Image (tube, rainbow, N blue to C red):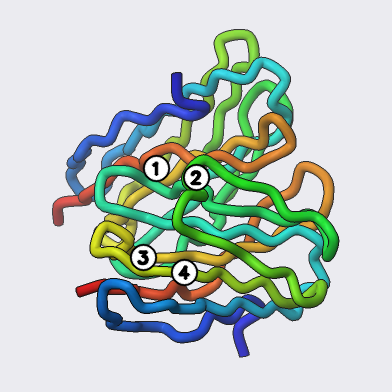
């Protein structure tokens, strides 16, 4: 099993629908991140959390919200999906300190 | 100014050649630097980390860090077609992890 698991792996949804992307990890890391990736734009940070009671906005948080339900779980919600939120979404984790991040398999989201 | 800048490429090299990938960063206090490889549609995977000035070698990969000039590079020796991927530079700055837009590398057999 993967250390960082994202569900669903693929999702097609309609404009205006609420959708939740889930991430769970077995690495015991404190820090969790949500990124989106668009062609030519690299990985852009949406939200991050350094522990269960800590939630921080990233560079592109508008239209998104998150919940850190436990150390191992970090969910991303799109309250009212719009087509320009069509992208590849990645969850990542890292331990505290200056250490590398480990990524989930990604969720390909299409908003029609 | 973006935290991390990379030449988006694409970069094409013949099989067996050296591929050179470059990255600059804006936060002078950054301490940790990473190179990730990402195949199309897949998640990024870590291939190198470097924390001190100088070179760090791991097999065919060498990471180079120059904090005074705020750049980090990745050399891939004896490039193979399986090295064809997008390479992402990442830097920990302002207590967070920032990525460049990636350089697409194609190794031509």
In this view of the protein, which residue sits in the foreground, B66 or B19? Answer: B66
Q: Chain of mark 1?
A: B
Q: Nearer the viewer, mark 2 or mark 4?
A: 4
Residue bearing mark 3: A88
Instruction: Judge depth for marks 3 and 1 and give the one in front.
Output: 3
Point out residue A5 in the picture as x, y percentages from the top left corner: 59, 81
Which residue is more in the foreground, A96 or B38?
Answer: A96
Disc 2 to disc 4, how far (Cα)? Answer: 43 Å
Q: Which residue is mark 1?
A: B77
Chain ID of residue with mark 3:
A
Cα separation between marks 1 and 4: 47 Å
Closer mark to the observer between disc 1 and disc 4 = 4
Give the quarter of the figure containing the N terminus of chain B: top left
Tag 4 near tag 3, CB within 8 Å: no
Q: Residue at x 51, y 84 (%)?
A: A7
Query: Which residue, given by chain and number where applicable, does mark 4 sit on?
Result: A79
Q: Earlier in the sequence, mark 4 or mark 3?
A: 4
CA distance for labels 2 and 3:
28 Å
The nearer-to-camera label among 4 and 3 is: 4
Residue at the spot of label 2: B61
Residue at position x 52%, y 20% in the image = B71
Where is residue A85? Give x, y as percent.
33, 61
Residue B54: x %, y % from top left = 65, 23
């Amino acid at each position: 099993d993967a250390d960082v698991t994202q569900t669903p792996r693929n999702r097609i949804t309609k404009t205006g629908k609420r959708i939740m992307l889930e991430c769970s990890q077995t690495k015991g890391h404190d820090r969790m991140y949500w990124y989106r990736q668009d062609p030519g734009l690299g990985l852009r940070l949406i939200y991050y959390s350094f522990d269960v009671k800590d939630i921080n906005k990233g560079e592109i948080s508008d239209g998104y919200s998150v919940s850190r339900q436990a150390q191992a779980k970090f969910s991303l919600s799109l309250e009212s999906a719009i087509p320009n939120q069509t992208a590849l979404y990645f969850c990542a984790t890292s331990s505290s300190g200056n250490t590398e991040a480990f990524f989930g398999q990604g969720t390909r989201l299409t908003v029609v | 100014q973006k935290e991390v800048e990379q030449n988006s490429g694409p970069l094409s090299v013949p099989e067996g050649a050296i591929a050179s990938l470059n990255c600059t960063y804006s936060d002078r206090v950054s301490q940790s630097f990473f190179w990730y490889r990402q195949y199309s549609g897949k998640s990024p995977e870590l291939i190198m980390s470097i924390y001190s000035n100088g070179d760090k070698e791991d097999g065919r990969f060498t990471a180079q860090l120059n904090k005074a000039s705020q750049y980090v590079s990745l050399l891939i020796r004896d490039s193979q077609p399986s090295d064809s991927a997008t390479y992402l530079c990442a830097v920990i700055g302002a207590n967070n992890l920032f990525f460049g837009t990636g350089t697409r590398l194609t190794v031509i057999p």
